[in-house]
Image (cartoon, rainbow, N blue to C red):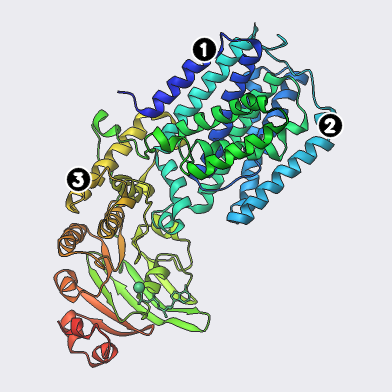
Amino acid sequence: MLSRPWLALLAALAFGVAMSFGSGSALQVATFFLINVLLAHSVNLLTGYAGQISLGHAGFFGVGAYACALLTRDYGLPLPLALAAAMALASVVGYLLSFPAGRVKEFYLAMMTLGFGMIFYEVAKEWTALTGGMMGLSGVPSPSLRTLAVFGMAVGPVAYLWIVLAIVVVVTVLLHNLIRSHFGRAYCAVHVSELAAGSVGISEAATKRSAYTLSAALAGLAGGCYAPLVAYLGPDSFALSRSVEALAMTIIGGLGSLPGQVLGAALLTYLPERLQIFAEYQFMAYGAILAVFFLVLPKGLAGMFAAPPRFAKTHAVVSLEPTPIRVPHSSGEGPLLRVENITMNFAGLRALDEVSLQLERGRVLALVGPNGSGKSTLINVISGVYRPSAGRVVFKGEDIAGRKAHEVSRRGIIRTFQDPRNILHFTVRENVLLGAHRLYRHGFLGAVCNSRAALREEAVFLRRVDEMLDLGGLAELGDRVLGELPYGTQRLAEVARAAVSDPELILLDEPAAGLSDAELEKLAAMIRRLRERDLGIVLVEHHMDFLNDVVDGVVVLDSGKLIYRGDMDGMRRDPEVTAAYLGVADEESVRA
Ligand code: ADP
Ligand code: MG
């Protein structure tokens, strides 16, 4: 059976056919609707998935429109080439904008993109030699004037509608595949939790750059299709109102939903037409309707009847017999991890004071100490979340102190968080699959075209995910949206996510906190499975009986200082450890 996004696409197709029998202006409006779908897809990629708001998309749209208009009119470039050039030019602009925009968030980002849109509008208005200024640019080869030809064949309004429809269908299919790939998951991860993204090897900066570039390319394509349709470009087509309209289509259609973009574009293309009966109150009615939509449909039109989007190529598992992919662990000389004299100062507070420890492969090291003693801070320093004030973190012979979190995790150090960091709108399976991010080898083209290699890789990792879900007792919950499940499940899913990443060193920050006895069993099963591999494990934990079963050694921190290093029995007899715990509720558990 066809899934709903495909049904929506077919509906759009049928709609296009129906419209092509209409009058000339109906044809033009239908083509404009399809162009709006492209523009909405573009905004949705950046805002709906990657979470970066844009109030300047008319700028990218305009770059594409002017590029296509000038290239076809003045240089006689064939339409396909002009469209490709429009995309390329807009994507360069998007790439450049991503550098300043990638550094700011929320209001500042909104302001910056708004500024970009306004600058573009002013340039379009003032650069008379290129754009014709306020007079505009006319004489663009156009289907309605019968001046457009593609490969020597004249293209009329009906043919042009079909061309744009084909582009929309192809773009939608490619986006569908993209979102169900490690690239698409990375967009969402950067949006929802930069910490989680970094911990599985996703570079926040690179991901945002790619989202801006791709989104701008799509808006450029939309603009490129727009120029021949209207035959005349004036700067007012690229004013702020166009950017706002594009964002409104995406939000009303449903952020993060592909069918939603079709719906949003349809509403915002046809509603203003229909509202002409209100004569001079047209825009007031329009504004009021939009305001009501935002109020009553926070998830957009798609939220009413489209299934929520999914983020993995789950069909790959059945369609291909996977061959296992293994990442070779270099054995290397010396200990796996050496922490040397790490000091971490926060304003006026020394959270770690010259802490040193080391860990061999195949060992489990417990990190204990009262609350506030610096355990999480140490994990944060090792995993690249914090840059230490002094000291070295030597992993497999390389000093990694101060490296970014995604660089650390790509080297094979994977961590979980004291407060679980998951992508709550992903299913359990998709969250765990995120852990495999650093292991993917197929590129962007493979991902958007669902190449054999891409499907095979996805199948291998999905299988590995399902094994881990079995082990963690989560198999039944694989398809459930994680945000709807209890806290314990979210914690276990995070540990499973770390486990499927094929780590060489895994850092678990209080994985057992808040787990029921049944869940503790599942956690222990996953940790035992990890121990079978030749990797190092650092476990921050308060449950002493839980630790007894699994650890090889223990270090104790107190107020940022390392006060004990040795085995569990020795720790219980150590007077300094006992004193550190005296008066705290944990005393009993130390003695237990
Ligand atoms: P633990 O995990 O052992 O409970 P933490 O490592 O979370 O302890 O905290 C150690 C100390 O460092 C605490 O006093 C805490 O308030 C402080 N601390 C941790 N992170 C920060 C931060 N980002 N800014 C300022 N102080 C911090
Ligand atoms: Mg902590």
Q: Please report the residue visible at 30 percent of the width from the left and 53 percent of the height from the top.
A: 497
Give coordinates of residue 440: x percent, y percent: 37, 43
Q: Which residue is mark 2?
A: 134
Quarter of image, ligand 1 = bottom left
- Ligand 2 is within 8 Å of the C-beta of the residue at disc 3: no
Up/down of 350 relative to 422, above or below? below
- Judge by depth and name the residue closer to the eye, 303 or 163: 303
Q: Describe the element under mark 2 as helix, strand or loop.
A: helix
Q: Earlier in the sequence, mark 2 or mark 1?
A: 1
Residue kind at label 1, given as amino acid type:
Ala
What residue is disc 3 on? Answer: 476
Of label 1 and label 3, which has the lower sequence position?
A: 1
Q: Earlier in the sequence, mark 3 or mark 2?
A: 2
- Which is more foreground, mark 2 or mark 1? 1
Q: Position of residue 9 (x, y in %)?
A: 45, 23
Q: CA distance from mark 2 to mark 1?
A: 36 Å
Q: Residue 76 appears at what percent x and percent y?
A: 73, 17
Q: Is residue 576 left or right of residue 560?
A: left
Question: Residue at (40%, 29%) from the top-left corner?
Answer: 5
Number of other residues with Cα within 10 Å of mark 2, as a class: few under 14, some 14 to 19, many 20 or more: some
Question: Would you say the residues marked 3 and 2 are in contact, meaning their CB atoms lie under 8 Å apart?
Answer: no
Name the amino acid type tagged 2: Met
Confirm if mark 2 falls within 8 A of ligand 1. no
| Image position of 321 (left or right of 45) | left
